[in-house]
Image: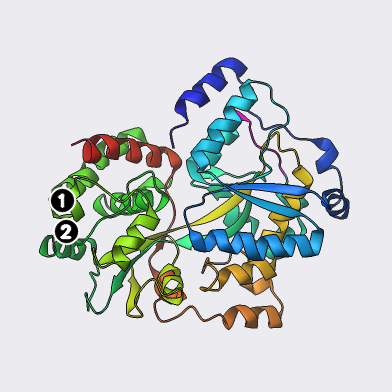
Amino acid sequence: MRVIFFLSLFLALTAGCSEAPTEESVLRQDYASLENLARGTEVRWHMWGGSAQINQWVDTYVAGEMKRLFDINVVRVPMDAPVFVNKLLTEKVAGKDTGTMDLLWINGENFKNSMQAGVLFGPFTDRLPNFTAWYDPQKSAHDFGFPVNGFEAPYGRAQFVFEYDTERTPTPPATLAELADWIRANPGRFTYPQPPDFTGSAFLRQIFYATTGGHEQYMDGFNPDLYAKNAPLTFAWLSELGPYLWQEGRTYPKDAAALDTLFARGEIDMAMSYHPAHAQMKILEKTYPDTAKTFVLAEGAIFNTHFTAIPFNAPNKAGAMVLANFLMSPEAQLSKFKPENWGDLPALEIGKLDEAQRQAFDAVDLGAATLGADALSAVAVPEIASEYLELLERDWDTIILGH
């Protein structure tokens, strides 16, 4: 998640040109014309590739439906968001008006950096019929506190949960203090992915909220003085527990998939995910034991919306818009919601669906491992501004990894 060098280079060379460019020839067309323009084309979707289940859903269901409905070939390109953002920044500086990326799965500080550098296409979401039909614009108006302004299309929601095995841990911790006590009492049985892995970074933000008095104080934008005052509390908590972690805190799993493997093999007794149905999905694929469950802490569980965006130099903007629109459809949202496919929470408004559609969502069996909507909503807290996230990851590298 280090794009500072490239962002600085771009800003220096473009001297204040920070608005993302638009392409009137595409945005001026009605949606039916866009579909016709996109037929028979290829859409290259650059996205995080760290989940085999998500990859399979894209490669089978999404690719299959896009081909069947629109004769569009979807090519999934695994690439971490900071990498493709840096690629866009360098292409912008070099004047490369036609790139190789059509659609991006992008969030948080990567979206903010991209918007400030003017490397995204739009605004386009108001041109997508599924967005106007099924979504609440206010619920997707910000991404990590930064205004979206139509340059991102929502396609899923997530919330942070912990995972445990009732055979090994009959009663999980209920609060942060109980979690700390459990870690001390069970040395070597807990760890978390190394930030900037998305799940590891989410855990870090969870601890930041919980050790500094809650999320409310951070909701008015970035305050460097507040961070300077509060961050030492978070890193003191993490540092004190370091020796009790897996490998005595000398090393950390490289990503969420590595953490899943440790938990599945029984090397640790707790895992975590930003997808509430993740444990159930792992049970269905016979990776986790049937006794796996999820829990949240009383101090809160962060939730967010994830989005797609289109690069300024996407060669197939029409196809990208058709794919973004399909991902927001009730059919795609329902498929994605099922734990056997992904278990990702729907981003659309269930109340806007007709009765048959609502019943289809209500009928989805999230499994015994998944917490109910009431339990999740009771502890839901919003994401932090991206400036806090960047500083937390930077200081984690220095204080925790570099100790």
Q: Are marks 2 and 1 in contact (CB under 8 Å)?
A: yes
Instruction: Please name whichever residue, 137 or 120, is drawn nearer the observer in this view of the structure.
Output: 120
Viewer can see residue 298: no
Q: Amino acid at mark 1?
A: Glu
Q: Main secondary structure of the magenta part?
A: loop
From the image, tell me which residue sits under label 1. 248
Q: Which residue is the extreme one toward the left?
A: 185
Residue 401, quarter of picture: top left
Task: Tell me if mark 1 has few (under 14), some (14-19) or many (20+) residues whose alpha carbon lies within 10 angstroms of its own.
Answer: some
Q: Give the x, y percent position of residue 284.
A: 46, 76
Left or right of 381: which side holds 60?
right
User: Mark 1 falls on what kind of element?
Assistant: helix
Task: Tell me if mark 2 has few (under 14), some (14-19) or many (20+) residues whose alpha carbon lies within 10 angstroms of its own.
Answer: some
Look at 24% across and 67% down and name the residue there.
269
Instruction: Please name whichever residue, 354 or 393, is drawn nearer the observer in this view of the structure.
Output: 393
Q: Is residue 121 magenta?
A: yes
Q: Which residues are magenta?
A: 116-123
Instruction: Please name whichever residue, 338 or 385, is drawn nearer the observer in this view of the structure.
Output: 338
From the image, tell me which residue sits under label 2. 188
Q: Amino acid at mark 2?
A: Gly
Whichever of labels 2 and 1 marks the residue nearer the N terminus, that label is 2
**Residue 114 - label:** none
Above or below, 367 relative to 131: below
